[in-house]
Image: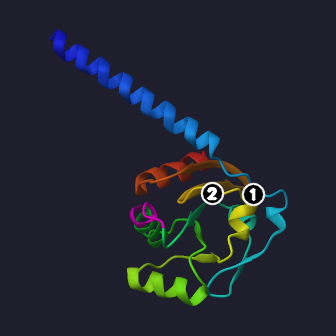
Amino acid sequence: MARLRRWTRELLILLLLVLGVTFAMDWWRAPQAPLTFDQHMLETLDGEPVSLAQLSQDKPLLVYFWASWCGVCRFTTPYVAKLVANGGNVMTVALRSGNDQQVEQWLAAKKLQLPVVNDEQGKLSAQWQIGVTPTIVVISQGKVVQSTTGWTCYWGMKLRLWWASV
């Protein structure tokens, strides 16, 4: 019994350390929305003009900064696609992944259906101070309310969107 208590305590300490480091890294790498992002219109690969602030007015918006060359994105992007397929309010930004045609070909090869703004030169991502891919930003009513970097599961994204709507 004493051994079980010791292992439980050690596991709890390890869990707290991992959570502390995770929150510290998210805080340190948190992107900053440009001051006028609410007035900035973007264009999707479909040619549709969009505003992140407007998309976030009725329900929280998950903005997913990713890259075709990003190893971790290969695991996260299918979860984002599942969120989109299930009606999630999502906009994605392809960071330095080629021209529009190359991004469309990459998406088709992976059989992914995503709303995408192509940030071919990385200017939009630089304005947001995105230093790590993938980066997930949650915007609610035109304000950034959460962000995280690195791998995130489907339920982690759903939880973030739910939390932002509470």
Residue hosting label 1: 142
Residue hosting label 2: 60
- How crowded pointer 1 is (Cα within 10 Å; few <14, some 14-19, many 20+) is rated as some
Question: What's the amino acid at mark 1?
Answer: Gly
17 magenta-colored: no
- Distance between the alpha carbons at the discs numbered 2 and 1: 9 Å
Question: What's the amino acid at mark 2?
Answer: Pro
The image quarter in which residue 108 lies: bottom left
- How crowded pointer 2 is (Cα within 10 Å; few <14, some 14-19, many 20+) is rated as many
The image quarter in which residue 166 lies: top right
72 magenta-colored: yes
Taking the spot 43% from the left edge, 33% from the top edge, the residue there is: 18
The image quarter in which residue 50 lies: bottom right
| Picture layout, residue 126 above or below residue 50 | above
Disc 2 on helix, strand or loop?
Answer: loop
Q: Position of residue 4 (x, y in %)?
A: 18, 17
What is the span of residues highlighted in magenta in the rendered image? 70-75
Taking the spot 84% from the left edge, 56% from the top edge, the residue there is: 35
The front one of 13 and 44 is: 13
